[in-house]
Amino acid sequence: MSEIMYVTHETMEQLKIELQKMRGVDRPAASRAIAEAREKGDLKENAEYDAAKEAQGLLEARIAKLEGEIANARIIEIDNIDTSKVSILTKVTLTNLNTKKTVTYQVVSEKEADLKAGKISVTSPIGQGILGKQVGEVAEVKAPAGLLKFKIEEIVI
């Protein structure tokens, strides 16, 4: 994975804690499960051993993926954000020109996205559509529901 991911300090710390847990707790537990299954006899017909080995393989893949994400992550300083246009970590107030409803979203990385908390991914259709737009501009977003038009009302941190 060579894609740069922009994150806040908090998200970077969460990623590091998750990786530390996988390495320090989950990995030794997987090794113990394999050792216990190995003690139960013939490995050719030992489903418990096969399951433990498969779980270990999945864990190692998740560890490798997380290590790659951390290596490619860049921490964004909130003080350096330009609010003249929509960018990552800005809060954007949009008016849907079709429904006349107004919503506010914070544009964040994929790892931080949480629609219930009002955080949309920079790689989502709406995130991509509004990125770089300024107050007063209309963003046309191609979504599964069709073409949506959003007017940028306000951009803040």
Image: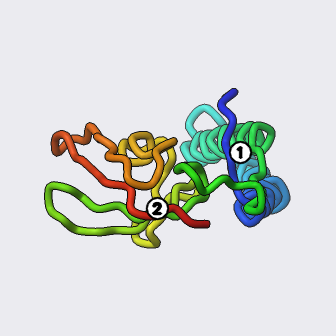
Specify the farthest residue to the top: 2
Circle 1 SS class: helix
Along the horizontal axis of the image, is 56 left or right of 138? Answer: right
Q: Quadrant of residue 29?
A: bottom right
- Sequence-first tag of 1 and 2: 1
Q: Quadrant of residue 56?
A: top right
Along the horizontal axis of the image, is 118 left or right of 76? Answer: left
Q: Quadrant of the N terminus?
A: top right
18 and 14: which one is in front? 14
* Amino acid found under the numbered disc labelled 1: Leu
88 and 3: which one is in front? 88
- Residue 100: % across, % down: 18, 65
Instruction: Identify the disc placed on residue 90.
Output: none
Q: Residues within 10 Å of mark 2 (few under 14, many from 20)?
A: many
Asked if the residue at tag 2 contacts the one at tag 1, i.e. Cβ–Cβ closer than 8 Å, the answer is no
Which residue occupies 41% across, 68% down?
104
Which residue occupies 25% across, 41% down?
143
Q: Quadrant of residue 77?
A: bottom right
Q: Quadrant of the C terminus?
A: bottom right
Per the image, the residue denoted by label 2 is: 92
Which color scheme did the rendering employ for the protein?
Answer: rainbow
Please indicate, yes or no, whether residue 15 appears anywhere in the rendered image: yes
**Residue 2 higher or lower than 7, as above or below:** above
Which residue occupies 77% across, 45% down?
74
* Amino acid found under the numbered disc labelled 2: Val
Which residue occupies 57% across, 49% down?
87
Per the image, the residue denoted by label 1 is: 66
Q: CA distance from mark 1 to mark 2?
A: 29 Å
